[in-house]
Image (cartoon, rainbow, N blue to C red):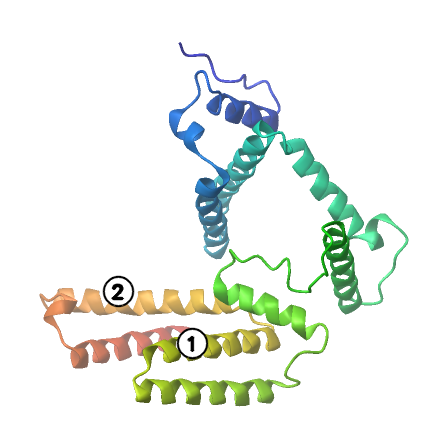
Amino acid sequence: MTRPAPPETLAPIDRLLAIMARLRDPADGCPWDLEQSFATIAPYTVEEAYEVADAIERNDLADLKDELGDLLLQVVFHARMAEEQGAFAFDDVARAINDKMVRRHPHVFAEETYGSLAEQKQGWETLKAAERARKDGAKGRVASLLDDVPVGLPALTRAVKLSRRAAGVGFVWPTVQDVMAKLHEEVGELEAEIAAGDLEKARQELGDVLFVVANLARTLEVDPEDSLRFTNAKFQRRFQYIEARLAERGKTPDQSDLAEMDALWDEAKAAEKAAADG
């Protein structure tokens, strides 16, 4: 027997919470929703976060509104499952982030003052470090600067965060030139393993190269994920130009060859440069 949806007269967040509770109702909820767990929902949570970032990248605010709703649903879904286990509820999630934001902004909600944005950033990191120490102390273990850098982050983003934590205590190459020298060193080691035909060691050396690239991005204050998204979009745009020109010739890429496609790539590149200069 079906029941009507929670009334629209509820506050939007309360209605969403009621909808999720209904979907997870063991008696007449949704079979798919009832089968889910934290682990099965986690990939959707990550995917929705990326879709938020994509809408921002495209400056599509209408889409951003929808994607933020999808991301909020993920928070509500996880909170509902936790409530069913007696761990915490949505209000606890909201309360925790409220407390954290007040605690980490003493210059707004208390009497702390910072002389610059750099001082404010350092104050934020100091407060986070104290929070980590309290958590680890409660668990009876020694705190590490790297403990709460999430393993589930994209590897390149996590590399930047790991290196930033280490840099905060002086474990860092002093200059961009030092990072570049290390990058050349690691590329040389990668080339040596490729030449030796040891693909397992080459895989490891490639990881070292990417980690140094992440350090270079941090040193330059560049988001490597953003840089790579830009290059991905550029590659897609130029390859689609190749496909369009080949179609005009009655061809598809697999009916072409590298020389022809390279020439069309150069055309696309030149056209983009001319459009930018014009």
Q: Earlier in the sequence, mark 1 or mark 2?
A: 1
- Give the class, few, some or many, for how many residues have Cα within 10 Å of label 2's Cα (few <14, many ≥20): some
Depth order, front residue of 239/211: 211
Q: Is residue 156 above or below residue 85?
A: below
Amino acid under disc 1:
Gln
Above or below, 119 relative to 86: below
Q: Quadrant of the N terminus?
A: top left
Q: Is residue 18 visible?
A: yes
Residue 31 in picture, x, y percent from top left = 39, 25
Q: Is residue 64 above or below residue 26?
A: below
- In which quadrant will I find the C terminus? bottom left
Q: Residue placed at 43% from the left, 64% from the top?
A: 229
Q: Is residue 83 above or below residue 151?
A: above
Which residue does the numbered mark 2 point to in the structure image?
240
Q: How many marks?
A: 2
**Circle 1 is placed at which residue position?**
204
Q: Residues within 10 Å of mark 1 (few under 14, many from 20)?
A: few
Residue at mark 1 to residue at mark 2: CA–CA distance:
33 Å
Q: Is residue 60 visible?
A: no
Q: Is residue 209 left or right of residue 233?
A: right
Left or right relative to 26: residue 150: right
Comparing 237 with 106, the one in front is 106
Q: Position of residue 113 (x, y in %)?
A: 87, 60
Residue at (53% x, 73% y) in the render: 214
Q: Where residue 181 appears, x then y in whole percent? A: 54, 90
Mark 1, secondary structure of its residue: helix
The amino acid beneath tag 2 is Gln
Dot 1 and dot 2 residues touching (CB under 8 Å)? no
Spot occupied by residue 86 in the image (x, y as percentages of width and height)? 62, 29
Q: Secondary structure at mark 2?
A: helix
